Amino acid sequence: MSDATMATTGSTVDYSGLIPNNIDLNSDARVRKALETWHPGYIDWWKQMGPDGFQSNPVYLRTAIGVDPDGWAKFGYVRMPEYKWGILLAPPVEGRTIPFGAHKGESAWQEVPGECRAMLRRLIVIQGDTEPASVEQQRHLGRTAPSLYDMRNLFQVNVEEGRHLWAMVYLLQKYFGRDGREEAEELLRRRSGDADSPRMLGAFNEATPDWLSFFMFTTFTDRDGKMQLEALAQSGFDPLSRTCRFMLTEEAHHMFVGVTGVGRVVEATCKAMRTAGIDDPTDIERVRALGVIDLPTIQKKVNLHFSLTLDLFGNEISTNAANAFNASLKGRFREDKLADDHVLTGATYPVLRLQDNMIVRQDVPALNALNMRLRDDFITDAAGGVQRWNRIIDAAGVPFRLLLPHVAFHRHIGEFASVHADPDGKLLDAATWQKRRDEYLPSAADGVFIESLMRPVYEPGTFAPWIAPPKTGIDGQPGDFEYVKLHD
Ligand code: BYC
């Protein structure tokens, strides 16, 4: 089949125009023009805010070429500005009905219902805003990549977040007219961490100063992405559902990069400790002298990134979430696999709340607790990654366990934003928190130490000493494969 394959079937991608797509963009002149008008701004943004350097180096990237689960991607060397960002929607499910909310059982909508236009636009804009934000947060990391393998994974994540932005902008341009066009412009205007024009959600304005942060971010924050996309994939608005379903295909690799990345850091630390005969994981100075990151500092990074990510689920009690569910716009995690009435009138859900300065479990109306339900599903999912890390520690015979902190720890959104708690959930007064903060979260000195390890390693098959090599290569490539060609 030629590059300009039939797009109408939705199973292959049309590369013949400026905007690769599987949505038959050629037959929709208005949207095609809108996207072609938006394209130069996107490229400018990518050049300004995308990866710092390496733009002209061939990178061994995966590009989506279709939406067939058995063969949706191809691997090959691509210069990042030539990566085919495009719009891909998962194939329509024939006869799909809305699985939840007031419209449960109706045929999924192909157009935006007038009464929920503003709510839907807000959900799409928030989702869209996170995608460029993460690219901005990670833009300096190529300069300190611990290997070409890791550098390639970073760039893979970056180009796919760029593609996810395209996917959201398509929805805005196609279904929201002038408002959508304005929102699409704003998505290119806001900047992560900018004092005047920050990204919309807190965690996306934090710095990602080093590779351990990147691996934690892709473990935890990308996993919020997975949960939110799973919830939006249930939407009664079918184009959103189809877009999110395809984004989820790519998202799995991002979390793989995170979980295996932290696992490899843990492995290098444990191995160096064993070789040096260090039995006490809290003997930080001796462990650091080996040129690896001590386990207590890794725990602090877990504490930081997990707590920042919990904030992304919003408030414990949320009428926004109830309204979006009632309106059949945003469901629960894998709603269609759940066995209840999918309407939730009269149902309750247990939520941890703050009462008289104590943390108590309270049954609240399930509709108002949807953010917490999604967050609980996230915590279960995230615990799997931590278990993998602990298996590596156990196998090395090191007496240490990484743990997820309590949900009240280090929060900026919701009930617990007004109090201080330690990682076990014990409430602390402000003075104690100040005194002990650096025991729980990375301190400035921890940052300086980690930064001292961030030296680039650009020889194929070679890895910085603080991270173990991966078990297998990307796309089955051998250990010394040149994932990024730096001297082309
Ligand atoms: N920061 O009723 P509430 C991803 C605001 S990540 C700042 O609890 P709701 C990715 C909230 O907007 C997934 N503000 O809110 C990962 C609201 O403001 P307004 C991104 C916050 O709506 C890695 C007010 O507080 N997608 O894809 O129930 C790399 C009241 O709160 C925050 C989505 O999140 C915060 N953390 O819940 C790349 C899906 N939390 O409107 C990509 C779409 C709350 O009253 N978003 N507020 O002025 C949503 O579903 C919901 O909007 C939220 C918030 C879950 C974010």
Image: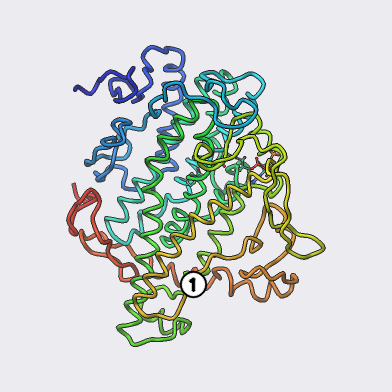
| Residue with the mark numbered 1 | 297
Per the image, label 1 sits on a secondary structure element best described as helix
Near mark 1 (Cα within 10 A), the count class, few <14, some 14-19 or many ≥20, is many
Q: Is mark 1 within 8 Å of ligand 1?
A: no
Tell me the kind of residue under disc 1.
Thr
Q: Nearer the viewer, residue 173 or 456?
A: 173
Residue farthest right in this picture: 356
Foreground residue among 166 and 175: 175
Residue 312: x, y in percent? 59, 48
Q: Is residue 188 visible?
A: no
Q: Is residue 107 left or right of residue 70?
A: right
Color scheme of the displayed model: rainbow
User: Residue 332: where, in percent of width, then height?
Assistant: 57, 41
Left or right, 140 with respect to 486, comes to right
Quarter of the image with the N terminus in it: top left
How many discs appear? Answer: 1
Q: Is residue 242 above or below residue 262?
A: above
Image-quarter location of ligand 1? top right
Q: Quadrant of residue 411?
A: bottom right
* In this view, 4 is above or below 353: above
236 horizontally vs 428: left or right? left
Kindly tell me whether residue 373 is visible in this rendering. Answer: yes
Q: Nearer the viewer, residue 473 or 452?
A: 473
Picture coordinates of residue 85 (x, y %)? 36, 32
For image coordinates 43% across by 75% down, the residue present is 294
* Residue at the image point whose x is 41% and y is 67% from the top: 389
